[in-house]
Amino acid sequence: MAASAPAGDPFEALGDPNRRAIVELLSRGESSVQELADALPISRPAVSRHLRLLKEAGLVVEEPLGTRRIYRLQDDGVEAAQAYLAQVWGDVVTRFRLTAENTTPRRTGTKPGRR
């Protein structure tokens, strides 16, 4: 049975600098809402709202641990975003590298016969 697609757009979710900061913090390891709020200049309720959007976009998952919720990056969601970027930018990077390798640099400011 295939996993359902996330409701939100991961790139839209990453458009907010606070959500990018949360993803960056979670890339170092799992954290609770309070731990994330302590590391950021925003309130605990704001962190919870951002986490909800990141979860809807398939970028984070939560796990109940007693009365707390522990958040971590959702590997599948992050890998899907990375694969998309690699596909799009990989083609661009390959074309740029081929162009750069097959182009003779032009020297400026020198006269013919002098270096």
Image (cartoon, helix red, strand yellow):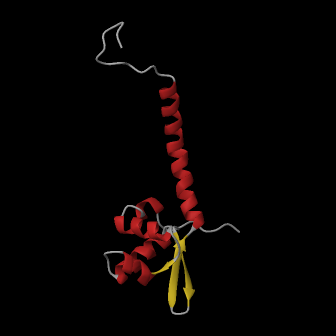
- Left or right: 2 with respect to 33? right
Task: Count up the numbered dots.
Answer: 0
**Residue drawn where x is 51% and y is 50% of the image:** 85
**Residue 54 at x, y = what percent?**
46, 70
Q: Above or below — where is 84 with respect to 25? A: above
84 over 97 or under it: above or below: below
User: Where residue 89 sits: x, y (%)?
Assistant: 50, 44
Residue 72 appears left or right of 108: right
* Quarter that holds the N terminus: bottom right
Quarter of the picture containing the C terminus is top left
Asked whether 26 or 78 is in front, the reply is 26
Q: Residue furthest right?
A: 1
The image quadrant that residue 16 belongs to is: bottom left
Residue 28: image location, x then y, percent: 50, 69
- Residue projecting furthest to the left: 109
Q: Residue furthest bottom?
A: 67
Please name whichever residue, 3 or 34, is drawn nearer the observer in this view of the structure.
34
Q: Residue furthest top?
A: 113
Residue sitting at x 42%, y 70%: 22
Residue 35 appears at what percent x and percent y?
A: 43, 81
Residue in the picture at 56% in, 86% down = 64
Is 67 situated above or below 60? below
